[in-house]
Amino acid sequence: MDVKTIILGFLNYGEMSGYDIKQAFTNSIGFFYDASFGAIYPALRKLEEEGYVTKQEIIQSGKPNKILYSITDLGKNAFRQEIQTPILPPVLRSDMLVKMFFGKSRTNEEQKNLLEGCIELQRDMLQQSKVNFKKLEAHFDEYQRFCWEYTIHHLETTISFLEQKMSSLVKQPAYSVPV
């Protein structure tokens, strides 16, 4: 699913500014799909050109004017059509897994540090996810709750898997990288 479709989904809940949309990405689906302001604002311009959203400028004194975006009926229809399309296979981009893939080029101590860092990062993400879940759960519908529970389960499983594999990976002899 692309950024434009997700923005339409967020706007189904009500009008939002670009900042509000960025916060919605970060605080609701950020674990499995995030977008930068550099992706959000061009998508909003395109959605407006296509007639899927409208914008309203709110005059504010002492600070920049606020632009609020609303979904149109055309945008609602486009969103409904898009969420009916077949699910695509996930595209996993993981800095952690790329570094693990090339782990043999590290010394045992470097491998150990890498794994410990991976575990610590996953624990931090799990802790933050649990905090956000508790803070926001009263507002979730059953599908949003499912996504949050999936995220927490995924993090717990990843931590367990990394801990289980650590001793066998650290024992592997390293080789030197050709210069």
Image (cartoon, rainbow, N blue to C red):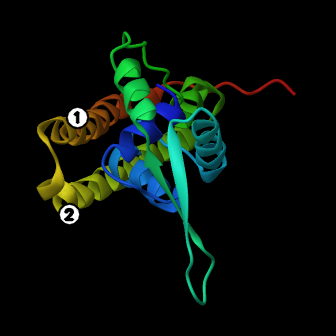
* Horizontal relation, residue 84 to residue 36: left or right: left
Lower position in the chain sequence, tag 1 or tag 2: 2
Residue type for callout 2: Lys
Crowding at mark 1 (Cα within 10 Å: few <14, some 14-19, many 20+): few
Q: Which residue is mark 2?
A: 135
Residue type for callout 1: Tyr
- In the image, residue 146 sits, relative to residue 65, either above or below, namely above
SS for dot 2: helix
Where's residue 133, x and y in %? Answer: 21, 54
Report the residue at 73% width, 27% height from top: 176
Evaluate if marks 1 and 2 touch, with contact meaning CB atoms under 8 Å apart: no
SS for dot 1: helix
Where's residue 154, x and y in %? Answer: 27, 34
Between 108 and 58, the one lying in front of the other is 58
Report the residue at 49% width, 24% height from top: 92
> Disc 1 or disc 2, which is closer to the eye?
2
Residue farthest to the top, as pictured: 86
In the rendered structure, find residue 150 and report the number of the disc placed on it.
1
Q: CA distance from mark 1 to mark 2?
A: 17 Å
Crowding at mark 2 (Cα within 10 Å: few <14, some 14-19, many 20+): few
* Visible residue check, residue 107: no
* Horizontal relation, residue 55 to residue 149: left or right: right
- In the image, residue 23 sits, relative to residue 39, either above or below, namely below
Where's residue 21, x and y in %? Answer: 46, 53
Where's residue 127, x and y in %? Answer: 27, 57
Between 158 and 8, the one lying in front of the other is 8
